[in-house]
Image (spheres, rainbow, N blue to C red):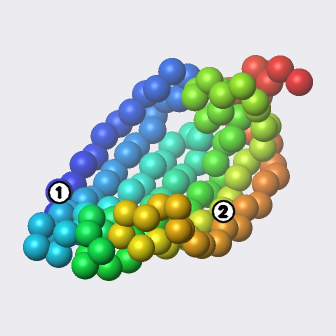
Amino acid sequence: MRRLVLNVNYRDLRDIQLAAGVSYDARGQRAQLVNLNITGPIGRIRADGVLALDPQGGESYLNGDTSALDALALMQALELPYFAATRIDGQARARWPALEFARATGDAKVVTGGEPSAAFAWRYPG
């Protein structure tokens, strides 16, 4: 397994810690996101998954969770045309055969509410 740990600053987003573990099984034709953790003042994002690179590699999947994610700060940093001044908690799970993303199935649960961080709230255009 390869491990990556970074401290990231991107536009107005500061003090973001990114930690990821990945592995690749050439014989099994599978790439694995063992874990991805992004934490900082904007909240937390966690994910894991497998990408089957060949039908014999089996099923691909991606699981993700967010906790207290500051949607406004993230949307502004990504320069999206719309803003949502809220915090997001949620989970998403998706599965699909090998590389056939169009056949993905899954479920998601998202809860919004609370106030965005004060550092970004003043920029809300509405």
Residue 89 appears left or right of 114: left
Q: Is residue 120 above or below residue 38?
A: above
Kindly state the secondary structure of the residue where label 1 is placed: strand
| Among the 4 quarters of the image, the one containing residue 9 | top left
**Cα–Cα gap, marks 1 and 2:** 27 Å
Residue 85 appears left or right of 79: right
Q: Between 118 and 108, which is closer to the camera in this rendering?
A: 108
| Among the 4 quarters of the image, the one containing residue 73 | top right
Residue 50 appears left or right of 118: left
Q: Between 108 and 99, which is closer to the camera in this rendering?
A: 99
Residue 53 appears left or right of 16: left
Kindly state the secondary structure of the residue where label 2 is placed: strand
Q: Amino acid at mark 1?
A: Arg
Residue under circle 1?
Answer: 2
| Among the 4 quarters of the image, the one containing residue 81 | top right
- Circle on res. 111: none
At x 58% / y 72%, what residue is drawn? 105
Q: Is residue 11 above or below residue 36?
A: above
At x 17% / y 75%, what residue is drawn? 28
Identify the image quadrant of the C terminus.
top right
At x 28% / y 46%, what residue is drawn? 5
Residue 124, image x and y in percent?
80, 24
Residue under circle 2?
Answer: 90
Q: Between 57 and 41, which is closer to the camera in this rendering?
A: 57
At x 51% / y 21%, what residue is drawn? 11
Q: Amino acid at mark 2?
A: Gly
Residue 19, image x and y in percent?
33, 51
Residue 61, image x and y in percent?
43, 70
Neighbour tally class for label 1: few under 14, some 14-19, many 20 plus, Cα within 10 Å: few
Residue 50 seen in the current view: no
